Image (cartoon, helix red, strand yellow):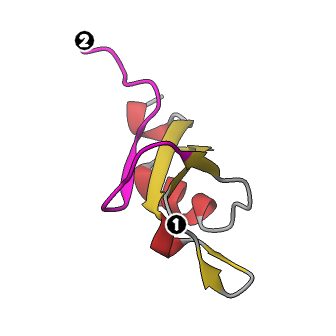
Amino acid sequence: MERSDVARAYVIRLPGVFIGYGGTKERGSFQTVVIAPSEDMAWDIAVMCDVWERLPFEVKTAQIFPKDPLPLS
């Protein structure tokens, strides 16, 4: 199996202006973790997710990265 075919955990972080609740934009930043085979699929899954954790620090841009990076080999 290719590494790109393996589903893994991705962290998606967004500035609060991306998260709307009740027609208002939230302050702060948010993150969610999803399982997907690629960053593109992780984004697609995250936009449908309704569970977002509020972060204690500000995120200025959207970020997608592996939760646990693969070891170099």
Q: Which amino acid, mark 2?
A: Ser
Q: Nearer the viewer, residue 22 or 5?
A: 22
What is the span of residues highlighted in magenta in the rendered image?
Answer: 55-72
Is 2 included in the stretch rendered in magenta? no
Q: Secondary structure at mark 2?
A: loop
Q: Main secondary structure of the magenta part?
A: loop
- Residue 55, percent across and down? 52, 45
- Relative to 61, does residue 13 appear above or below in the rendering? above
Q: Residue at x 41, y 45 (%)?
A: 57
Q: Residue at x 32, y 14 (%)?
A: 71
Residue beneath label 1, please? 27
Q: Residue furthest left?
A: 73
- Residue 2, percent across and down? 41, 32
Q: Are marks 2 and 1 in contact (CB under 8 Å)?
A: no
Residue 25: which quarter of the image?
bottom right
- Determine the CA span between mark 2 and mark 1: 41 Å
Q: Viewer-nearest of labels 2 and 1?
A: 1
Q: Residue furthest bottom?
A: 23
- Relative to 65, does residue 61 appear above or below in the rendering? below
Residue beneath label 2, please? 73
Q: Earlier in the sequence, mark 2 or mark 1?
A: 1
Q: Residue at x 49, y 42 (%)?
A: 56
- Horizontal relation, residue 62 to residue 24: left or right: left
The quadrant of the picture occupied by the C terminus is top left
